[in-house]
Image (cartoon, grey):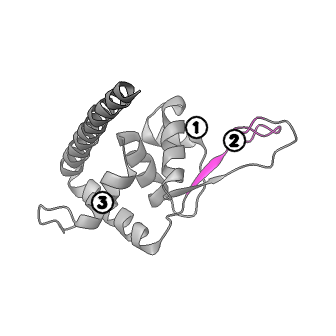
Amino acid sequence: MTKPMSGTVPDDVRRLLFDCIESYEELELLLILEKSRGTAMGTEELGALARVHESLIEDALHALARRGLIAVQDPPQAPGALPEKSTTGKARRFLYEPASAGVDGAVRLLARWYAEEPQLIIRLMSEHSIQRVRAGAAIAFADAFLLKKDRSDG
């Protein structure tokens, strides 16, 4: 594959990374599911493909589902059965199912960039993590003053 990159990650890929992907586990799982379009997989299979323990990928998969990148297929449940497993022992399965064609296009482009320039994508994810931490700290700092002000009013 020839290099399609110019050194600058496209804006839609940057937005996808910033808005929808918070960890390397999420990135790896999303790309595995995108590559396996139409095939639903369980956590054990995904864990083996991503070389990540099942316990570490549960949260990542559910986060991707909440953000509209993948779908969760629940097995039929018997009354009183635990939500993660059916009474027959079948676990939930996960399937690549982006919320829109635009999101799908961004994920396809992300997969291409990550295959050819993984260090660039990893660096961008690290920068986004730092931005999230800074934003969270700024909000917490501002909230501390609001709480202090509220206490002094009463």
**Could you tell me how far apart the alpha carbons at marks 3 and 1 are, in whole angstroms?**
30 Å
- Residue for badge 2: 91
Identity, as a three-letter code, of the amino acid under mark 1 = Glu
Front residue of 65 and 45 = 65
**Could you tell me how far apart the alpha carbons at marks 1 and 2 are, in whole angstroms?**
9 Å
| Residue occupying image coordinates x 48% and y 32% | 56
**What is the chief secondary structure element of the magenta stretch?**
loop
2 or 3: mark nearer the eye: 3
Q: Earlier in the sequence, mark 3 or mark 1?
A: 3
Q: Residues within 10 Å of mark 3 (few under 14, many from 20)?
A: few
- Residue for badge 1: 44
1 or 2: mark nearer the eye: 2
Q: Is residue 74 visible?
A: yes
Query: What is the magenta range?
Result: 82-95
**Could you tell me how far apart the alpha carbons at marks 2 and 3 are, in whole angstroms?**
32 Å
**Where on the picture, by quarter, is residue 150?**
top left
Q: Residues within 10 Å of mark 2 (few under 14, many from 20)?
A: some
Front residue of 141 and 35 = 141
| Placement of 35 over or under 87, stated as above or below | below
Q: Earlier in the sequence, mark 2 or mark 3?
A: 3
- As drawn, is 1 to the left or to the right of 98? left
| CB within 8 Å, label 1 to label 2 | yes
| Placement of 136 over or under 19, stated as above or below | above
Identity, as a three-letter code, of the amino acid under mark 3 = Arg
| Residue occupying image coordinates x 32% and y 30% | 149
Which part of the image, by quadrant, shows the N terminus? Answer: bottom left
- Residue for badge 3: 15
